[in-house]
Amino acid sequence: MSADKLVTEAAGHLGSDESGKGDYFGPLVIAAFFCPEGQEPVLAELGVRDSKALSDKRVLALDSALQAGYVHSVVAVGPEKYNELYDKFRNLNKLLAWGHARAIENILERMDVRRAVTDQFGDERFIRQALMTRGRTIELEQRPRGEADPAVAAASILARAEFLRRLAALSREWGMELHKGAGPPVEAAAAAFVSRHGAEALSRVAKLHFKTTARVLAGL
């Protein structure tokens, strides 16, 4: 490859995963991670696995090591932008595909990678359609339990760590704890948030299409 080309040929594959999809408060974060050929044992030695099987503390520690040592991309969609995009797409899987495509393309702008693996969340055509010119030539594989692939597992850690940091920042900004997930503590926090800041402010911290919103507003 000529020296003036920006894209570097690379042996290995990409993995992408998201965090925040099931969390009422906070952003949706999608990460892509490039696993160089032969690095799978190194990632295993580090303890890289599906972020859902790790504590928050461990996720944040692994995130630092992965960011320092590997090519990656993190796309964070804050609540206000998320609500705007959801209104546009009217389909969560299409929104996810848009985010995965952006994260993958960010790496493809720097490296010539031929294969990408993602966790299966919807019709593969959604990602194909969302990818731009370079991404449409990649071999794309969507797998059930995709986090069994080390690149996808690493991406899940990067995405979760960024989600945790941003959720903590939102909690500090609004002066109250915005819980993870979508259970009763989250609904109680949402009701307290609306009582304190008003219903219109909810779009700045939460994903409004969740049923939690309707229940909280019905209780006013």
Image (cartoon, grey):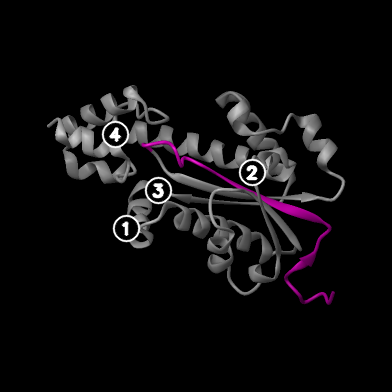
Nearer the observer: mark 2 or 3; the answer is: 2
The answer for how far apart the CA atoms under marks 1 and 4 are is 24 Å
Q: Give x and y (percent) for residue 159.
A: 56, 42
Nearer the observer: mark 3 or 1; the answer is: 1
Front in this rendered view, residue 113 or 88:
88
Front in this rendered view, residue 199 or 71:
199
Residue on which the image places disc 2: 144
Label 4, secondary structure: give it. helix
Q: Please name the amino acid that badge 4 sits on.
A: Trp
The answer for how far apart the CA atoms under marks 4 and 2 are is 37 Å
Q: Earlier in the sequence, mark 2 or mark 3?
A: 3
Residue drawn at point x = 64 percent, y = 36 percent: 63
Residue on which the image places disc 3: 78
The answer for how far apart the CA atoms under marks 2 and 1 are is 27 Å
Q: Which residues are magenta?
A: 1-25
| SS assignment for the magenta stretch, majority | loop
Label 1, secondary structure: give it. helix
The answer for how far apart the CA atoms under marks 3 and 1 are is 14 Å
Label 3, secondary structure: give it. loop
Q: Please name the amino acid that badge 3 sits on.
A: Gly
- Would you call the spot at circle 2 few (<14 residues within 10 Å), some (14-19), or many (20 or more)? few
Nearer the observer: mark 2 or 1; the answer is: 2
Q: Earlier in the sequence, mark 3 or mark 4?
A: 3
Q: Please name the amino acid that badge 1 sits on.
A: Asp
Say left or right for 114 vs 91.
right
Say left or right for 190 vs 105.
left
Disc ID at residue 87: 1
Nearer the observer: mark 1 or 4; the answer is: 1
